């Protein structure tokens, strides 16, 4: 069973803006997926179909085996957790712990189970010390962690993140990346929409490039080495691809780049 199956999905907003057009794709389970595209390419609109914030107007979307339609939304939202671009849009309780408890309580779980899930979720994102604090009184990076804890407390297996690194300083961004890797290795499927080509190049198992609501290209992150494709998508080449143009290999991370340069300094040919 695929994590996501989309067939000829189209969606237009009430002002007539066509956000998605005949979009078809499939996403396997337990993969790291990056959606890339310029502003207006349809990334956020697509993500909002994955947990039923938007319903298909034309075509179909199946998530974790369930059709995205009104009578399946309760089940889908247990399985699919979504982090908005602005986490303040999903934090509304008086304390972080109460916010994390909201979803499990809505599932009708007994209070002991709710408390267990809240404790485990806060521990997973390393914010147990924030449990009693009001969400409005913590940093942006901490708000994103609190929102992720709320998703984990629902035992979501498909995690969907809209621009998770926007507004974060490098330290918090690295912490969040480490958390995503931990969640992935725990068996979850992770989908990210991002403008950060360098992050996608280093991290993703599969990249899907959108342009004007359509799939322009999909495949491994090697796609991001294609200068003509990236220009067509209005995206920049990854920094490490630009830096190592003309060589035999392209490192994906600074660590790999340092290793290549180390070998080159000792006479190995990388050109």
Image: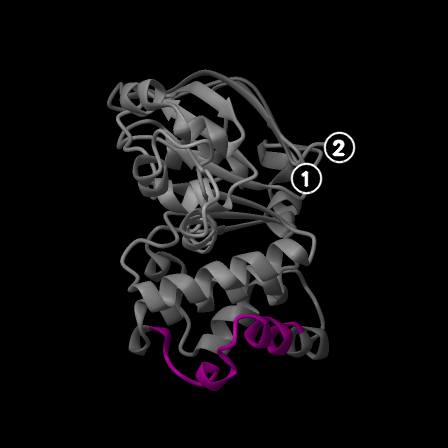
Q: Nearer the viewer, residue 36 or 15?
A: 36
Residue 116 point in image, percent of width and height: 68, 77
Q: Nearer the viewer, residue 52 or 82?
A: 82
Q: Residue at x 36, y 54 (%)?
A: 165
Q: Nearer the viewer, residue 141 or 10?
A: 141
The image quarter in which residue 75 lies = top right
Residue 120 part of the magenta-drawn span: yes
Residue 211 point in image, percent of width and height: 34, 21
Mark 1 vs mark 2, CA separation in Å: 8 Å
As helix, strand or loop, the secondary structure at mark 2 comes to loop
The residue labelled by disc 1 is 29
Q: Residue at x 47, y 53 (%)?
A: 259
**First in sequence: mark 1 vs mark 2:** 2
The residue stretch that appears in magenta: 117-135
The image shows residue 256, relative to residue 139, as above or below, that is: above
Q: Residue at x 45, y 44 (%)?
A: 252
The residue labelled by disc 2 is 1
State the predominant SS element of the stretch in magenta: helix
In the displayed orientation, state which residue is furthest to the front: 267
Residue 138 part of the magenta-drawn span: no
- Answer whether residue 7 is visible to the viewer in this image: yes
Residue 23 point in image, percent of width and height: 48, 18
Q: Residue at x 65, y 72 (%)?
A: 117
Quarter placement of the N terminus: top right
- Answer whether residue 61 is visible to the viewer in this image: no
Judge left or right: residue 62 versus residue 256: right
The image quarter in which residue 181 lies = bottom right
Judge left or right: residue 17 versus residue 118: left
Number of labelled discs?
2
């Amino acid at each position: 069973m695929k994590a996501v199956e989309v067939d000829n999905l189209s969606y237009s907003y009430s002002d007539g803006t066509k956000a998605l057009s005949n979009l078809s794709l499939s996403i396997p389970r337990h993969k790291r997926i990056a959606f890339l595209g310029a502003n207006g390419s349809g990334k956020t609109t697509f993500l909002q179909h994955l947990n039923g914030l938007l319903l298909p107007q034309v075509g179909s979307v199946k998530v974790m085996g369930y059709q995205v339609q009104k009578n399946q939304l309760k089940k889908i939202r247990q399985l699919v957790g979504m982090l908005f671009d602005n986490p303040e849009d999903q934090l509304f309780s008086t304390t972080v712990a109460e916010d994390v408890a909201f979803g499990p309580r809505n599932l009708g779980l007994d209070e002991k189970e709710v408390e267990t899930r809240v404790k485990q979720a806060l521990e997973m994102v390393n914010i147990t010390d924030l449990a009693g604090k009001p969400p409005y009184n913590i940093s942006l990076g901490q708000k994103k962690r609190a929102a992720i804890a709320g998703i984990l407390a629902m035992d979501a297996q498909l995690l969907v993140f809209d621009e998770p690194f926007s507004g974060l300083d490098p330290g918090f961004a690295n912490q969040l990346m480490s958390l995503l890797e931990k969640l992935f290795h725990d068996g979850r499927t992770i989908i990210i929409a991002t403008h950060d080509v360098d992050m996608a190049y280093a991290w993703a198992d599969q990249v899907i490039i959108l342009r004007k609501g359509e799939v322009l290209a999909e495949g491994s992150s090697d796609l991001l080495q294609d200068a003509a494709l990236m220009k067509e998508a209005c995206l920049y080449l990854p920094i490490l691809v630009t830096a190592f143009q003309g060589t035999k290999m392209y490192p994906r991370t600074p660590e790999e780049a340092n290793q290549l340069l180390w070998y080159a300094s000792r006479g190995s040919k990388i050109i």
